[in-house]
Structure formats: structure tokens, C-alpha cells
């Protein structure tokens, strides 16, 4: 197996396990990842940590030899496959974090972009270098990166193909936090721990309001917020949260 999935209490841990090739994303790896993410979605996990095995890389990108000399329709299908798998991460109802402890290039950075959050160590190096091969990102990079850091900064990274370090990633909003203490799994769990005390319903509604509203005009975004806020009020967790506040006790959320 080149993708390992383990559970530890509330956490699911998905690890790319091809350190000998810097955890490159072959099509077999993408298929295994899709199966693992389906398992996560059906599980009782409340948060997902995504890491890469080995000391050098989170994920150095696509398995380049697989991309050569393919017919046009295979190229189209390959991009669609990668986008579909990464969409599974983005669509999870639980928060996810990619822990970037080394190289995250091309498809590897696109994998991280599909997660809710990104944490990096000082050793992280990130970029979308496809332009240097006469290509462009094909697993969501041209769409997720501008929505995250703005069009100007995204075009700079995509059109230059340059590599950035963790500190620049944090400064431009690509990275949420820099953390060097412990293993990638420990770093990811520590980052997500504060979210576990909240209702998964409210976390999901909040993320949907931000992400869907961010792709709409302000008037449409406000309607999205209104509708999701109303849904949140109708949940059992909202009733519990309001009661707990009035009664001055910790809320006991049930994620519904």
C-alpha cells in the first residue's frame, strides 16, 4: 500500500507512503487515496491529518514518467481523476490539515490546498512548478490558490513556478501556522485539537458559508450565510450550546 490510513480517537491520519520517490502521486496512489477518503467520510472521525512519510517531502507532485506520451483524452481523464480525489478532501464534513514538513510541489501543493488548513515546518518548500515543464497545474491549483491568497499572488507563483519557504507561505496566507515541534502527525493533531470541542455541524456550516459565499456576489453570499445560519439554529447542537451558555456549563455537542 502506498497510502496508509489509521485512526486514533477522533483523528483520522492519511499518510502518503512512497518516501523513496518523495511521495509522488501516481495514478495508483490517487486511486488508493480515493478509497481511503471514502473510508474517512463513512467513519466517526472528527478531523483528518494528511502527511507524507520520510524526511524530505510531504509530496513532491505527480509521478512524471506516467505523464509522458499519453493520448489527449488520457491527459484529460488524468486531470479529472486528480481533481475528483482532491474534491473528496475538500468536501469532507470534518476539518482537515496538511502538514508540510518538506517538499510540496505541483500536485503535492494542490493536495495541501484541498485541505481546510495547512501547517508547515521550517523545512517546507512549496511551489507550482508546472510552467517550467510547459504545463499548468491540473489538480485544482489554478482555482484553489487564487481563492486562498488572491489572484495577484497566485499568478506570481503559478506563472513563475518559483519555490517559496514556510515564512513566505505564512505571510501570504498559504500556510496557517509554522510549527516545528514533534512529528508531522503530532503537529497536525495539535493544530486541529481546538476544533474538536465544537459541533461538527457548526464547523461545516461556517466553512460552507465562507467558501460558497466567497465565490458569489456579496448579496448572494449574504443569502448563503442567512440560509446556513438558519440551518445551524435548527440543529440539536445549537439548542445545547445556547442552553449550556445560559446554564454556565460546558456544552455537550452531538454533531447534529
Image: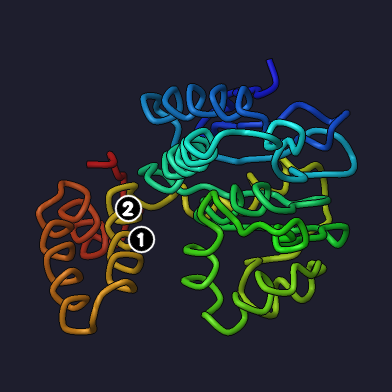
**Residue carrying label 1:** 207
Residue 88, horizontal then vertical, whole percent: 42, 39
Seen in the picture, residue 1 relative to 20 is either above or below; the reply is above
Quadrant in the picture for residue 242: bottom left
Seen in the picture, residue 238 relative to 41 is either above or below; the reply is below
In the image, taking residue 121 as reference, residue 119 lies left or right, namely left
Given residues 204 and 175, the one toward you in this image is 175
Residue 169, horizontal then vertical, whole percent: 71, 71
Report the Cα–Cα distance between label 2 and label 1. Answer: 5 Å
Given residues 99 and 80, the one toward you in this image is 80
User: Which numbered disc covers residue 57?
Assistant: none
Query: Which residue is found at the position 86% from the left and 34% from the top?
Result: 54
* Dots 2, 1 in contact, CB < 8 A: yes
**Residue carrying label 2:** 204
Query: Which residue is found at the position 58% from the left and 50% from the top?
Result: 97
Q: Secondary structure at mark 1?
A: helix
Residue 170, horizontal then vertical, whole percent: 70, 73
**Label 1 crowd bin: few (<14), some (14–19), many (20+), radius 10 Å:** some
Amino acid at each position: 500500500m502506498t497510502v496508509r490510513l489509521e485512526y486514533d480517537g477522533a483523528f483520522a491520519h492519511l499518510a502518503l507512503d512512497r518516501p523513496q520517490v518523495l511521495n509522488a502521486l501516481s495514478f495508483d496512489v490517487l486511486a488508493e487515496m480515493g478509497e481511503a477518503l471514502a473510508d474517512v467520510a463513512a467513519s466517526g472521525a472528527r478531523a483528518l491529518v494528511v502527511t507524507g512519510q520520510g524526511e524530505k517531502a510531504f509530496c513532491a507532485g505527480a509521478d512524471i514518467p506516467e505523464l509522458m506520451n499519453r493520448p489527449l483524452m488520457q491527459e484529460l481523464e488524468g486531470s479529472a481523476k486528480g481533481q475528483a480525489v482532491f474534491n473528496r478532501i475538500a468536501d469532507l464534513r470534518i476539518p482537515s490539515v496538511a502538514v508540510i514538513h518538506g517538499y510540496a510541489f505541483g500536485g503535492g501543493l494542490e493536495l495541501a490546498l484541498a485541505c481546510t488548513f495547512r501547517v508547515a515546518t521550517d523545512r517546507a518548500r512549496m511551489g507550482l512548478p508546472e510552467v517550467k515543464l510547459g504545463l499548468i497545474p491540473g489538480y485544482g491549483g489554478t482555482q484553489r490558490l487564487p481563492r486562498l491568497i488572491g489572484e495577484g499572488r497566485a499568478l506570481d507563483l503559478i506563472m513563475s513556478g518559483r519555490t517559496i519557504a514556510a515564512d513566505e507561505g505564512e505571510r501570504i496566507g498559504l500556510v496557517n501556522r509554522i510549527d516545528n515541534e514533534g512529528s508531522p502527525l503530532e503537529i497536525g493533531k495539535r493544530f486541529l485539537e481546538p476544533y474538536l470541542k465544537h459541533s461538527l455541524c457548526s464547523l461545516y456550516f461556517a466553512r460552507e458559508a465562507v467558501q460558497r459565499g466567497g465565490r458569489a456576489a456579496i448579496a448572494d453570499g449574504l443569502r448563503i450565510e442567512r440560509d446556513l445560519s438558519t440551518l445551524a439554529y435548527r440543529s440539536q447542537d445549537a439548542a445545547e450550546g445556547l442552553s449550556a451558555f445560559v446554564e454556565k456549563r460546558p456544552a455537550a455537542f452531538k454533531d447534529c
